[in-house]
Amino acid sequence: MVGTLDIALDKVAQSRISEFDENNIQFAKVYSDHMFEAHYRNGHWEDMVIKPYGDLSISPANTTLHYGQSIFEGLKAYKADNGDILVFRPQANAQRMIKSAERMCIPAVSEEMFMSTLNELLKIDSDWVPSKPGTSLYIRPITFGLDPFIGIRPSDEYMFLIFTSPVGGYYSEPISVKVETHYTRAAPGGVGAAKTAGNYAAALYPALQAQKSGYSQLIWTDGLTHEYVEESGTMNIAFIIDDTLVTAPTSDTILHGITRDSVLTLAQDLGINVEERRLSVKELIEGLNSGRVKEAFGIGTAATIAPIKLIGHEGSDYDLPSIDNWEFAPKILKALDEIKTGKVEDKFNWVYRVR
Ligand SMILES: *Cc1c(COP(=O)(O)O)cnc(C)c1O
């Protein structure tokens, strides 16, 4: 038994860590030795175990496979210079997962359970947290319905898993994105603010169309008018217009990104003017033409800040100023990285130290 919860421990006989080359990390190619698993039945979470990472056995009638009653999270752990394992704002992920759970009729994992299981898993697989600059351990918690029943209703039983994978930087090169004015990611009253499976399946087709035209991601616009900027791919998005950082306010069509919240807090702390307001595609295109839009970047856990070099809109492409001349995003990225890796004082109390 480990931790404050009743977690059984079934350790691997032989670690696979030697298969992992820290100098050549491919995104999510290799998963760490262990995963955490818990089962929800009769109204509570039980059978908690840390066990070897491996396949699950699922009924063909599994409700999640058919109807997508599934929610997930994504967060990262970093290795500090002194060897400590630092997790960036995991409590915020736990809280967001509780909100996603409510929207999808999934029983929540409490923040306490999330935090102690995460702590124990990271302690056991601490060797898997890479230490080179730009690397981290990606952490994927997921909860999904387990019932072997193809009727449509909330499942009675669920599984909660946490597994991890060492990762390098995600998008290092500046990306080209296309403003999507036909397809919709999220509609008012829908599930866009929940990190739930179907949102991502629905986005594959529009993203693929854009990729065929040479863009690597989309800028999603609002589902009602397609006139206002919402997100970029699976990231939030922000712009530097004149000397102000502009990003859409969160709503039920925009995922409440933890990186977004951190970037806004840090920008204000760095003395940068921040506006959370709706930004029309019209204003964006005019600003790109006039040179008022100086920087554009995706914001999310995977890439932290993904610089955008080009924005396509209805057949025309607009270049951003060369990233070498950017002032704001690099400053914010550096400040964020220094906090995440424990290089500077954690004045916002964002870093959780595995103990
Ligand atoms: C996860 C996610 C984000 C970014 O959230 P972070 O907490 O910063 O990782 C933004 N948009 C969508 C659609 C997402 O799924």
Image (cartoon, rainbow, N blue to C red):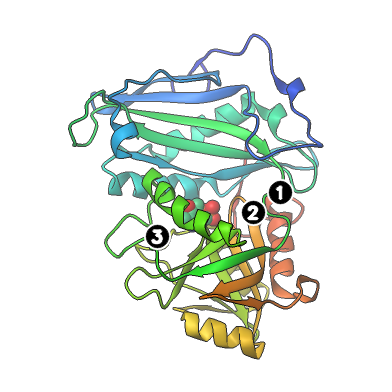
Q: Would residue 345 be visible to someone looking at this image?
A: no
Q: Which label belongs to residue 185?
A: 3
Circle 1 sits on which residue? Answer: 169
**Dot in front, 2 or 3:** 3
Q: Secondary structure at mark 3?
A: loop
Kind of residue sitting beneath label 2: Ala
N-terminal of the two: label 2 or label 1? Answer: 1
Please determine whether, in this image, residue 262 is positioned above or below residue 42.
Answer: below
Among the 4 quarters of the image, the one containing residue 307: bottom right
Residue appearing at x 52%, y 63% in the figure: 218
Q: Is mark 3 within 8 Å of ligand 1?
A: yes
Q: Secondary structure at mark 1?
A: loop
**Position of 73 compared to 128: left or right?**
left
* Residue 38 appearing in the image: yes
Count neighbours of disc 2 (C-alpha within 10 A) and say few if under 14, some if 14 to 19, many if 20 or more: some
In terms of sequence position, does the residue under pointer 3 or pointer 1 come before the other? 1
What is the quadrant of residue 77 in the picture? top right
Identify which residue, 71 or 11, lies in the foreground. 71
- The location of residue 187, given as percent across then percent down, is 32, 63
Disc 3 from disc 1: Cα separation: 26 Å
Task: Count neighbours of disc 1 (C-alpha within 10 A) and say few if under 14, some if 14 to 19, many if 20 or more.
Answer: some
Q: Are marks 3 and 1 in contact (CB under 8 Å)?
A: no
Q: Nearer the viewer, residue 224 or 332?
A: 224
- Asked whether disc 2 touches disc 1, contact meaning CB atoms under 8 Å apart, the reply is yes
Q: CA distance from mark 2 to mark 1?
A: 6 Å
Image coordinates of residue 151 in percent, x first then y, are: 17, 32
- The CA span between labels 2 and 3 is 20 Å
| Residue 152 at x, y percent in the picture | 19, 36
Q: In this rendering, which labeled residue sits more in front, label 3 or label 1?
A: 3
| Screen quadrant of the C terminus | top right
Which mark, by number, is residue 303? 2
